[in-house]
Amino acid sequence: MLIIGSHVSFTKDKQMLGSLEEALSYGANTFMFYTGAPQNTIRYEINKERIEDAKKKMLENNIDINNVIVHAPYIINLANDDATKYDFSINFLKGEIKRCEELGISYMVLHPGSHVGLGIERGIENIIHALNIVLKDSNNVTILLETMAGKGSEVGSKFEEIKKIIDGIERKELIGVCMDTCHLNDSGYDISKFDDVLDEFDKIIGLKYLHCIHVNDSKNPLGARKDRHENIGYGTIGFENLLKVLYHEKLDDIPKILETPYILDKAPYKEEIEMIKSRKFNEKLKEIVD
């Protein structure tokens, strides 16, 4: 079964119930959200009543909460060992994990971090050290390291880098990977040869660690290392190549999440999900979203 959804909002009042309702309006059967703004530390208390309302509505609509994803905020950087920033990132990530536990969410996607000139090896060491601290007290929330585009000093643009991080994690049952198709393309992995990419991932990391896929087209050529998402079928990866990812037999039970750009300030996810389900490219997508 295709498990498809998108990034959705998480508001103070309706919280996860509102996230679910937005996802349902797109025809989705999963979704991903931040538990607060990704660029700041403002967090509202989790409303337990809204959690129960959301869980009830998920059951009514055949949505498995185990397929729902939380994304960690961008302000967390575990690769930079500046004492103040490093301690902040560790403690804030601990707080986000606690929020996931309150919500009943099992998976949190995390950008590994940027080494800011320290070098890739030191950045990896910092990430490993921080994650071992964070995961020590985690009950059941698995951190999914996202494959990155490789812009600036990002860690995680190569499978080997993610493998090194996983190798250093003590509680390996709580670590995994989230593939991002745009990031893969921009870091140099050719999605038109996705079977080869998946085989390489399996050989280096192992498919057992793959628990989420961000499905985005890219505005950039292969290997550009820029990270600019494009709407499905409108970028350099292309519709047919993304369909091969979405419907790959080895990835059938893995949630696929759209993070494509808004069109005229409106989310395109309903139309993109329709396009994906019908397997027919909509050449007028950017004209009809209204």
Image (spheres, helix red, strand yellow):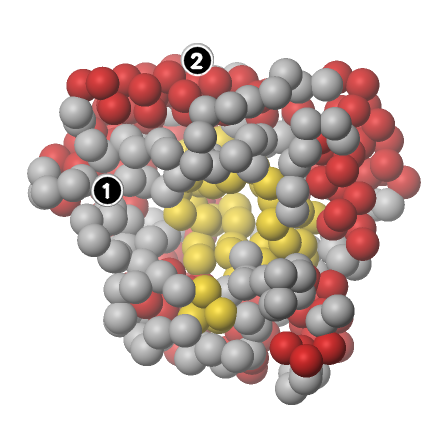
Question: Is residue 112 in view from this perspective?
Answer: yes
Callout 1 secondary element: loop
* Residue 137 disc label: 2
Q: Locate residue 285, reporting x and y percent.
A: 67, 78
Q: Locate residue 246, reporting x and y percent.
A: 59, 67
Amino acid on which the number 2 mark rests in the picture: Asp
Name the residue nearer the viewer: 255 or 113.
113
Question: Is residue 277 in view from this perspective?
Answer: no
Which residue does the image show at 31% across and 75% down from the upper left? 222
Amino acid on which the number 1 mark rests in the picture: Ser
Disc 1 vs disc 2: which is toward the camera? 1
Q: Locate residue 168, reporting x and y percent.
A: 25, 31
Calculate the distance from the C-alpha at mark 1 to the C-alpha at mark 2. Answer: 24 Å
Crowding at dot 1, Cα within 10 Å, few <14 / some 14-19 / many 20+, comes out as many
Which residue does the image show at 54% across and 57% down from the upper left? 259
Crowding at dot 2, Cα within 10 Å, few <14 / some 14-19 / many 20+, comes out as few
Q: Is residue 11 left or right of residue 38?
A: right
Instruction: Identify residue for label 1.
Output: 114
Residue 233 sits above or below residue 170 on the image: below
Q: Locate residue 92, reporting x and y percent.
A: 41, 21
Quadrant in which the C terminus is drawn = bottom right
Residue 133 sits above or below residue 116 on the image: above
Which residue does the image show at 62% across and 61% down from the upper left? 265
